[in-house]
Amino acid sequence: AQTVTQSQPEMSVQEAETVTLSCTYDTSESNYYLFWYKQPPSRQMILVIRQEAYKQQNATENRFSVNFQKAAKSFSLKISDSQLGDTAMYFCAFMVPGTYKYIFGTGTRLKVLA
Amino acid sequence: EAGVTQSPTHLIKTRGQQATLRCSPISGHTSVYWYQQALGLGLQFLLWYDEGEERNRGNFPPRFSGRQFPNYSSELNVNALELEDSALYLCASSLRQGTDTQYFGPGTRLTVL
């Protein structure tokens, strides 16, 4: 069975600083997708970034980038130049293609401080 | 383009009652997914519907059921409500033959008293 672990329940960062959120997963599959979703206090989940396991290059989306280490089964999210609007719950998720079922971690609550 | 919509925003029921939650996917999306987000438990996959059929089911009892309509909207029904069913229920949609990325709605907060 696949599992996703987010070991940091809460984190805080000063505005304009950089923060890294950790995510590890366990699977015997070789092909899969990894995602980071953001859930602001308004509660609508928003896709932040997505990574296909067969791609060696780390995905980036503006201030958001990932460090994907397939052998270590690690998928961390780096937020650069943190903004107050980044305050949210961040969920790491895993999916095996064709199952269409996300497996989520328990989330990391990030607070950006002014 | 309109996103995934869910209704109602909040729902209050008592133990033993039935709850019906509704979801409209993004236009063009044929797959709808339901997740339960209970306090402290993260998101748990409930159900996946595509083209009107139930395609996958999470580890939930049969009193959690649903359906998908010809316009791809979906209902989640929870029968014989229990206190532990209190949670945020999130609906998501995706393209069936697409990128597997799911887009979420704002959720329905179900409170069971």
Image: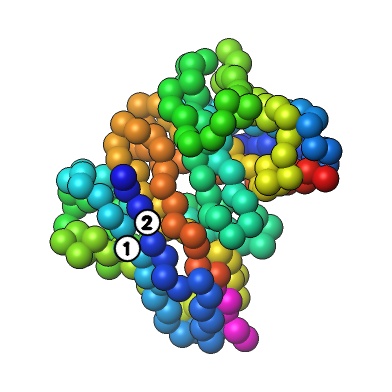
Residue A24 marker: 1
- Coordinates of residue A101 in the picture (x, y in percent): 41, 38
Say which residue label 2 marks: A4
Q: Answer yes or no: do the residues labelled 1 and 2 have beta carbons within 8 Å?
A: yes
Which structural element holds mark 2? strand
Which structural element holds mark 1? strand
Q: Is B38 located above or below residue A8 in the figure? A: above
Q: Which residue is pictured at 47% across the width and 35% down the height? A: B58
Location of the C terminus of chain B by quadrant is: top right
Query: In the rendered structure, which segment of residues is drawn in magenta?
Result: A110-114
- Coordinates of residue B81 in the picture (x, y in percent): 73, 35
Within 10 Å of disc 1 (Cα), the crowding (few <14, some 14-19, many 20+) is many
Location of the N terminus of chain B by quadrant is: top right
Q: Is A59 located above or below residue A15 in the figure? A: above
Q: What kind of residue is marked 2?
A: Val
Residue reaching furthest to the top = B70
Q: Is A95 located above or below residue A38 in the figure? A: above
Q: Which residue is pictured at 38% across the width and 62% down the height? A: A5
Residue B28 seen in the figure? yes
Q: Nearer the viewer, residue A77 or A17?
A: A77
Q: Which residue is pictured at 49% across the width and 16% down the height? A: B53
Q: What kind of residue is marked 1?
A: Thr
Residue B10 forms part of the magenta stretch: no
Q: Quadrant of residue A85?
A: bottom right
Name the chain letter of the residue that bears numbered label 1: A
Q: Which residue is pictured at 63% across the width and 57% down the height? A: B39
Q: Is residue A52 left or right of residue B41?
A: left
> How many labels, in total?
2
